[in-house]
Amino acid sequence: MKARMRAITVVLAIAMSAWFSIAAHAGNQGGGAAQSAESTISGKVYQFVKIADGVYYTTSSSLMATGGNHPIIINDRDVLLVDDGTTPAAARALLEDMKLITDKPVRWVVNTHFHYDHTDGNSVFGPDVEIIGHEFVRHAIADLDVLHREPLKTAFANMPIQIEALKKQLGDAKDPAQRATIEKQLAATQADLEELKKLKPTPPTATYSSKMTIYRGQREIQLLFLGRAHTQGDTVVFLPKERIVCTGDLMESRLAYMGDAMFDEWISTLEALKNLDFDTVLPGHGVPFHEKSLITAYQSYLKDLIVKVAELRKQGLSAEETAQKVDLTSHKVDFPQIQGPGADIRGVRRMYEWMDERAKR
């Protein structure tokens, strides 16, 4: 029984890290190379890596649930922050740690899409901060009951299970050092759950439909909607002079959540992304990378996923059965998180829905 409980705990830990602390291990996941320790500034919760003058990429290795990674753009007089985390506590911790790299105020927050791990820090900002997103992001947060739908739904369901598993681990642990580690994990997870219970969905205060440009001194910041993809309202933040693109979850250095995907359009939107003149990609999860070939590899993965899921569906398999059986291991070289056959059930369910939507056109 103890062995079984330990196995369950490992599975839960993997699942929760995927949705609450993806950034905690960003330096070890996906394509690209981790930055050297010498170029990293570490705060209590977040680490900041300088990418270019006034441009930082922010990750976290804290036990706190922080959500996606954050590009930070420091201008002559103010700061633009890309996404703001899973909870108000995460956003407040980010603002506190940002004092290590700048004393300038945050003037803009860009929500790259509506998912909670990128937007649920919105509520900590006052009226002097403009929160910008694609028009669909405002609609989603305001109208789609995001507190009771994926991906937050699974997070709420899994976290109490993880807490109970940690309590069981703590009860079984004898070594003082091990107990201390588990106690910290348990306290952090319990605090995260309480924060999630307090979430107040806060939509953007300003929206755009296809393109918005912000000029600050010599810096040009473009907000681009290249097409529907990861969601129906993904924003790419493009710095043409620095040749840097911040992609949110439209393009990660690893496989992305697909529960709101528009699969065929995602492939064409990635093609539009490749047409931009950039040298560095700062993704919403994973690590920075430079190779457009990784984008091409993800397009290939999506195409293969569509074909193979369609084949299994034609055989009469349910979404749940297909999620267990679909084999995408041929893409493991580019996306090493693939360990064997199978795919996230939420993404496969979404693909079944998407196929039904296409059939009705």
Image (tube, rainbow, N blue to C red):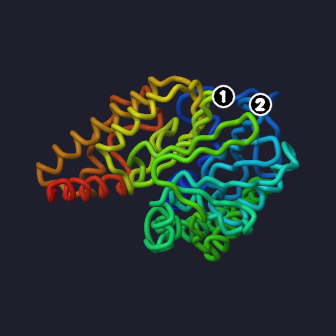
Q: Earlier in the sequence, mark 2 or mark 1?
A: 2
Q: Element under label 2?
A: loop
* Residue receiving disc 2: 53
**Viewer-nearest residue: 300 or 343:** 300
Badge 1 amino acid: Glu
153 to 348, vertically: above or below: below
Q: Residue at x 53, y 29 (%)?
A: 31
* Numbered label attached to residue 180: none
Q: Residue at x 70, y 47 (%)?
A: 60
Rendering quarter of residue 130: bottom right
318 to 222, vertically: above or below: below
Q: Residue at x 48, y 39 (%)?
A: 251
Mark 2 touching mark 1, by CB under 8 A?
A: yes
Q: Position of residue 88 (x, y in %)?
A: 70, 66
* Residue receiving disc 1: 242
Q: Residue at x 47, y 68 (%)?
A: 153
Q: Outermost residue toward the left?
A: 315
Badge 2 amino acid: Asp
Any part of residue 286 in sight:
no
**Viewer-nearest residue: 277 or 155:** 277
Q: Is residue 313 rendered to the left or right of residue 4?
A: left
228 to 164, vertically: above or below: above
Q: Position of residue 213 (x, y in %)?
A: 59, 44
Q: Element under label 1?
A: loop
